[in-house]
Image: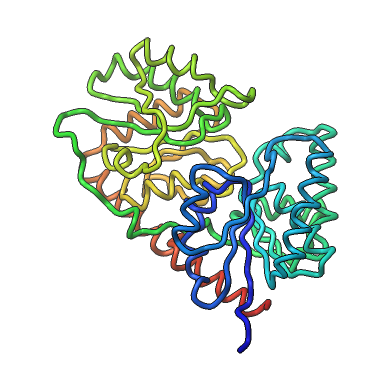
Amino acid sequence: MQRKKKIAFVGNTSFSIYNFRFGVVRSFMNEYDVTIIAPRDEYSEFFSKEGIKYIEVPMDSKGTNIFKDIKLTMTLYSIYKKERFDFVFHYTIKPVIYGSYACRLLNTKCIAITTGLGYTFRDKNIINTIVMHLYKFSLKKVQEVWFLNHDDRRIFIERGIVHEDNTFILYGEGINSKHFSPAPKKFNDDKFRFLLFSRLLKDKGIVEYAMAAKNLHEKYPNMEFRLLGKANNDTLENIPIKTIKEWEKNGFLIYLGESLDVRPFIADSDCVVLPSYYREGIPRCLMEAMSMEKPIITTDNVGCIELISDGINGFQCKQKSVDDLVDKMERIYNLPEEKRLLMGKAGREIIKQKFDEEIVIREYQDKIKQLI
């Protein structure tokens, strides 16, 4: 009896694979032997419960220690050699670079998926120059490089990292529109609730959101400004928890902490806001909000612009402009309720037509049939 072909999904967190790609992973389980390779976190145990093999691999996803990165490459090489995968999907910078190189050494087919460029191509420094060369070296032999938006793809082509013919646009990582479906609010009051939920990075526009809340909360007493996400103090890019607590103390923002299930918080909101200037792939939080029929406010930033049709499913604001963000928040607040509801429905329709998980799964399945 012929053995099932073996496929691996490799990421920098178990959380991201489980929350963002698990529908894709599950779609391969009947036909292939599937393995997840990622650092251990609170989501790792869910894979074995689903009958999926999980291999832990330590990874310093933000570190620049060359010896740790060499060790990671050797670890991935050893795993790939032992498991004899027929195909590997790599996500995020370190799996893409070091995993793709390990596959190159073993002549294993793989696809590299860039989920957003983050800070890598924003600043000109020695670290980012090295990263760019590592990308170029590691991606020479991959079957394809996938991007979540056209701008990231353009940058890689213009800088000679990849050849245009070896690229593919995957519109987001797929939203389960049945899971993220419209739901009733638990509140029955006259409050208008804005919600920002995200990693609490400065470049996600968290400070601009807080300053907009400060400007609006006295003028509109029934406005409520909510913030959901894990607070870290580990890097300069994060908003310190002390700062968030100070905003709360001053009465213009409510911090909700973090949650494994964001749907109740989306359901209770009237509008979801992400004034990001981070180099997004395509923001997951906005797709989840749109799928639940919430109007959005976001910027003309890369990734965000793929989701917003200004005036149709929400409003577009300028990056780093508190004044423009205030204006757009006032505008959506002053719209008749039926107009906001129509915006929400338009957003869900965009998700179902272009970003639904079933569409993404078909793209994966078609590619695998072509490449294996």
Residue at 41% across / 38% down in the picture?
297
Q: Which x, y percent locates residue 121? A: 73, 40
* Nearer to the camera, 170 or 73: 73
Residue at 61% across / 24% down in the picture?
234
Residue at 53% across / 56% down in the picture?
172
Outermost residue on the left side: it is 188
Q: Is residue 286 left or right of residue 67?
A: left
Q: Which x, y percent locates residue 268? A: 26, 38
Q: Is residue 358 left or right of residue 89?
A: left
Q: Is residue 62 left or right of residue 181?
A: right
Q: Looking at the figure, which quarter contains the N terminus?
A: bottom right
Quadrant of residue 84 within the rendered picture: bottom right
Judge whether 170 appears above or below 64 on screen.
below
Q: Which x, y percent locates residue 163? A: 79, 63
Residue 57 makes an appearance in the image: yes
* Nearer to the camera, 189 or 232: 232
Q: Looking at the figure, which quarter contains the C terminus?
A: bottom right
Residue 150 makes an appearance in the image: no
Quadrant of residue 331 within the rendered picture: top left
Judge whether 232 appears above or below 291 on screen.
above
Residue at 70% across / 64% down in the picture?
167
